[in-house]
Amino acid sequence: MSRKVLIGVLVISLFSFNVYAGEVEVLHWWTSGGEAASVAVLKQLLEKEGHTWKDFAVAGGGGDAAMTVLKSRAVAGNPPTAAQVKGPQIQLWAEQGFLANLDDVAKAEKWDELIPKVIADIMKYKGHFVAVPVNVHRINWMWANPAVFKKAGIEIPKTWAEFDAAAKKIQAAELIPVAWGGQPWQEATVFETIVAAKGPEFYTKTMVKADPAALMSDTMIKVLERLKALKQCTDKGAPGRDWNLATAMVIKGEAGVQFMGDWAKGEFTAAGKKPGVDYMAPTAPETGKMFLFNVDSFIMFKQKDPEAAKAQKAMARLILQPKFQEVFNVNKGSIPVRMGMSEDPFDAVARTSMKDFVATSKGGGLVPSMAHEMAVMPAIRGAIMDTVTNFYNSDTSAKDAAAQLASAVKAAK
Ligand code: GAL
């Protein structure tokens, strides 16, 4: 090959591989089957635009491990381009001056018109966009295998009293009533779902305002007793179990139900299961009028390299575009955060969620998830989560645990 031809070939291949485009390193914790299929969509869309995706996945549902790794990278002066960070924590990162201003993308793409205001406000720091929302997850679901209920000869329960009766029958049929993932964030997820059954006022007082008097009230004692009662419905393998392995127990018909947010639906979908046929997804007992929301979002770190900044902005833009919102959310089990999307590609569970999101936002039942970092600052969430997990895994009485909740929260405030 002559020198000239060689240079020509090099130039052409440089262009076709887009080596001049930027790289985004993205920290997230989406490593289960359904989650990985969802995040792959974003990677593909970015690569289509010529950018490079450097995956920085830190396994561990709920993201606690990912947040620890993120903090150490940031302290070392080497944060990734984007990171999955949610709720009030966005403000903490922005206050410390880490985050890029995304107002130009937001303006060009009309984010303020496309995202519900309650959610847009969480994404802004001092009125400027510093994060992009991805989806809306609902926490208070009960994922049920109808075949297990059929074997036990009982209906899927709507109240906690019916649930107790069903659990006994499932046990009598030698199956496990509840697929339990024994990790603090999962126990906190079930806990806040039981709190939600007490209505929006009690939920807000305890999980959003962290009011010590409400945290040690008789109602809270009842909530804790209910949580502890679920322990008899679980199996010996529960301690430490990952959430997606608990979902698999329901999918395989080993367990009756799992209480978990609708990322669990992503696992059913990835396993080729159909709602209403292979599995049922009623809201958790007595929480039909509640919508515990959990919005995933990405914060974007300031960039020195202009190409990386371009790739970062492209990522921000793509996240709110209809194509991504549709494919990602169908796989993930969540609903689009972009308003005005067609319901057609979504299944019955997602449609219920869309309808209930609107209804509860009018009826007062739309409340942020404590367990999933939407409601309180990390120190308070940590105090609640530690107390709940210690209670669930010890012989502490519900009354003592309620008092501990109040004092742990006071100390964290
Ligand atoms: C949540 C997150 C979901 C899902 C879940 C389990 O905190 O918002 O998107 O990934 O953890 O990993």
Image: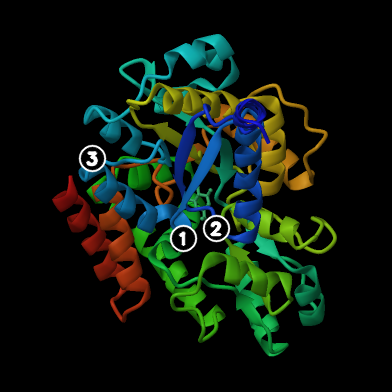
Residue holding disc 2: 31
Q: Position of residue 243 (x, y in %)?
A: 54, 65
> Measured along the vertical axis of the image, is residue 37 above or below residue 109?
below
Vertical order, 210 against 308 (above or below): below
In the image, which is nearer the foreground, mark 3 or mark 1?
3
In the image, the residue with mark 2 has its CB under 8 Å from the nearest atom of ligand 1? yes
Q: Is 263 situated left or right of 80 in this image?
A: right
What colour scheme governs how the chains and residues are painted in the rendered image of this protein? rainbow
Q: Nearer the viewer, mark 3 or mark 2?
A: 3
Assign a secondary structure to mark 2: loop
Circle 1 residue: 59
Could you classify mark 2 by the number of other residues whose Cα lies within 10 Å: few (under 14), some (14-19), or many (20 or more)? some
Q: Earlier in the sequence, mark 3 or mark 2?
A: 2
In percent of width and height, residue 305 lies at 37, 26
54 to the left or right of 396: right
Q: Identify the amino acid type marked 2.
A: Thr
Q: Is residue 333 visible?
A: no
- Mark 1 Cα within 10 Å, few/some/many (few <14, many 20+)? some
**Residue occupying image coordinates x 31% and y 40%:** 209
Query: Mark on residue 77?
Result: 3
Identity of the amino acid at label 3? Gly
- The percent coordinates of residue 398 (x first, y second) are 32, 70
- 346 sits left or right of 283 in the view: right
The residue lying toward the viewer, choosing from 163 and 68, is 68
Mark-to-mark CA distance, 3 and 1 = 22 Å
